């Protein structure tokens, strides 16, 4: 038996729950399908979200689920494994449990996964003293001894950015050759006081469950208490591909083409949060979910009004 909804939201992070909150308050029958894999799960806290600065991500999401449930939104812990068009322009979402749900409109807030550098110790300490975003964590580790692991030439940009939070920054070139640094790179690194260390990183040095340094393949060790890395973004865009949505290539992965509301090239399907782009922080993701839902609700309203027979 297939349940019918006005909207199905795939993804129960900040973007998906924000969309669900708007839809629930608009009295739309809404289902949220949440696989329970938020991108920020490794972090101890989220930052930069007004009134929620410092809240643990799990607590933030629990509060969100509690709020949307007040408005009759149905939440299910499951995974959407397929989506197809059915009659009258609607969509059928198939879940891993075998359940199916039909929807007039979709919000896909499936996010992305961070693929970390393979240096031993990085994955184990990610979200603690191995970090990726200074806006998320810079204040908490300010003035400590920073290292930056360069997997690409973009590591220069990251090293320059984190120098706002500490004046003790070392850029480990790792997978980047010295000759790849441009004249402007070298000038800016020198101006920021960033030390540059060539050579590949072999492992992290950890003592008493704290990062204390970085060891290179030549055996040399460099004392550091924080390491910034640049994960490779892996968008969870399978559902967009199944629907035939137009996509765009970026330095951070393949994402659906969207308009200012998040509407994709597939009528009736919106992308929200990191499903639409790499750089969405929690506050931006929530905003994009709100915008998508408000647009979706208005579209449904006018579609229904236009379907009412004229009384001439």
Image (tube, grey):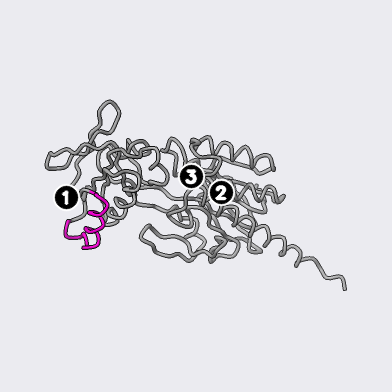
Residue sticking out furthest to the right? 312
Label 3 SS: loop
Q: Earlier in the sequence, mark 2 or mark 1?
A: 2
Checking the image for residue 219, the label placed there is none
Residue sticking out furthest to the top? 208
Circle 3: is it few (<14), some (14-19), or many (20+) Cα within 10 Å? some
Which residue is at a point 38% across and 52% down the rendered structure image?
233
Which residue is at a point 21% across and 51% down the rendered structure image?
173
Decide: is 44 above or below 189.
above
The C terminus appears in which quarter of the rendering? bottom right
In-image side of 182 versus 284 (left or right): left
**Residue 86 spot, x, y in % from top left:** 61, 60
The residue range painted magenta reads 178-194
Residue underneath mark 1: 198
User: Foreground residue, 13 or 308?
Assistant: 13
Check if residue 192 falls in the magenta segment. yes
Which residue is at a point 24% across and 62% down the rendered structure image?
184
**Residue 238 spot, x, y in % from top left:** 46, 55
Q: Quadrant of residue 6?
A: bottom right
Residue sticking out furthest to the front? 191
Q: Nearer the viewer, mark 3 or mark 2?
A: 3
Circle 2: is it few (<14), some (14-19), or many (20+) Cα within 10 Å? many
Check if residue 274 falls in the magenta segment. no
Residue underneath mark 3: 48
Checking the image for residue 16, the label placed there is 2
Q: Nearer the viewer, mark 2 or mark 1?
A: 1
Which residue is at a point 48% across and 44% down the rendered structure image?
48
């Amino acid at each position: 038996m297939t349940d019918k909804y006005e909207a199905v939201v795939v993804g129960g992070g900040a973007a998906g729950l924000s969309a669900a909150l708007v839809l629930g308050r608009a009295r739309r029958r809404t289902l949220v399908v949440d696989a329970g894999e938020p991108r920020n799960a490794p972090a101890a806290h989220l930052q930069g979200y007004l009134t929620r600065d410092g809240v643990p991500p799990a607590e933030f999401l629990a509060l969100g689920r509690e709020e949307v449930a007040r408005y009759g939104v149905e939440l299910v812990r499951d995974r959407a494994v397929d989506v197809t068009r059915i009659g009258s322009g609607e969509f059928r979402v198939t879940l891993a449990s075998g359940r199916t749900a039909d929807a007039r409109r979709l919000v896909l807030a499936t996010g992305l996964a961070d693929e970390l550098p393979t240096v031993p110790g990085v994955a184990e300490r990610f979200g603690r003293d191995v970090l990726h975003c200074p806006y998320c964590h810079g204040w908490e580790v300010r003035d400590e001894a920073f290292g930056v692991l360069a997997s690409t030439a973009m590591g220069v940009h990251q090293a320059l950015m984190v120098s706002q939070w500490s004046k003790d920054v070392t850029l480990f070139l790792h997978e980047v050759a010295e000759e790849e640094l441009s004249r402007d790179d070298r000038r800016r690194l020198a101006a920021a006081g960033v030390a540059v260390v060539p050579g590949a990183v072999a492992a992290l040095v950890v003592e008493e469950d704290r990062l204390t340094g970085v060891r290179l393949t030549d055996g040399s060790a460099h004392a550091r208490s924080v390491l910034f890395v640049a994960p490779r973004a892996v968008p969870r865009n399978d559902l967009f591909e199944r629907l035939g949505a137009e996509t765009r290539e970026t330095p951070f992965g393949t994402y659906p083409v969207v308009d200012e509301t998040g509407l994709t090239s597939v009528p009736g399907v919106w992308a929200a949060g990191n499903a639409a782009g790499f750089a969405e922080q929690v506050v931006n993701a929530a905003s994009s979910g709100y915008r998508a839902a408000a647009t979706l609700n208005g579209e449904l309203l006018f579609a229904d009004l236009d379907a009412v027979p004229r009384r001439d």
